[in-house]
Amino acid sequence: MELSIYNIKGEVTDKKVTLDDSIFGIEPNEHVIWLDVKQYRANQRQGTHKSKERSELSGSTRKLIRQKGSGGARRGDIKSPLLVGGARAFGPKPRDYSFKLNKKVKVLARKSALSLKAKNNAIIVVEDFDFDTPRTKSILELTKNLQLADKKLLFVLPNQNKNVYLSARNLARVNVITASDINTYKIMDCVNLVMTESSVAVIDNLLKA
């Protein structure tokens, strides 16, 4: 697939970039995309939730009512899970939600996500750019020039760029990531993928079989 390269003014340049069909042109596998997104979100969970069970709750162990003759069910002490303020039966305990995925599955998931974006014409390639100083206005002007001001965007840069990152940090609908850190969740979480010219080569080297 061949795409035109835009400059930061939103104008089409004479340059073009060829997206590798083995990365951007495969048949998307939705199941592996789901698996990779599930793993990413699971890894974000702290797993520090905890509620007290009967043995951990302080309170009197006196039997509240007699065993028989009340016409109601038997009732133990005040820590019973049936009572307001009582313990919780089978409550959550600290646990690790992370799970393993094979490297080949994760690579296929990223390729599938990129191919899905390419199939939907949701990938835009721009010339390598930088800002002199961090300014939110600069990134807003860029999105307007590309006619993407109302879209949720993911900017993919070849390497860390502090000025670009700080310029986009205050915008809820704009994220910035390096090509080496790109993942399936971030790709699927945006409407349009804005890649710089150099980041395409980094992704090719990273995902090429």
Image (tube, grey):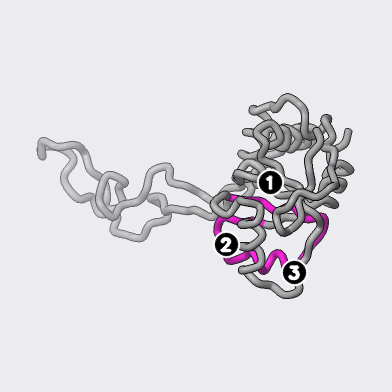
Left or right: 70, with 52 as reference point? left
Quadrant containing the N terminus is: top right
Q: Residues within 10 Å of mark 3 (few under 14, many from 20)?
A: few
Helix, strand or loop at mark 1: strand
Q: Earlier in the sequence, mark 3 or mark 1?
A: 3
Spatial distance from mark 3 to mark 1, Cα to Cα?
20 Å
Which quarter of the figure has residue 167?
Answer: bottom right
Q: Which residue is mark 3?
A: 131
Q: Which residue is mark 1?
A: 193
In this picture, which residue range is highlighted in magenta? 152-175
For the residue pair 190 and 119, the one nearer the viewer reads as: 119
Q: Earlier in the sequence, mark 2 or mark 3?
A: 3
Could you tell me if residue 99 is visible in this image? yes
| Amino acid type, residue under disc 2 in the picture | Leu
Q: Is residue 112 magenta?
A: no
Give x and y (percent) for residue 122. 66, 40
| Amino acid type, residue under disc 1 in the picture | Leu
Q: Is residue 158 magenta?
A: yes
Residue at position x 47%, y 53% from top? 50
Q: Which residue is mark 2?
A: 171
Residue at position x 71%, y 58% from top? 9
Q: Residues within 10 Å of mark 2 (few under 14, many from 20)?
A: few
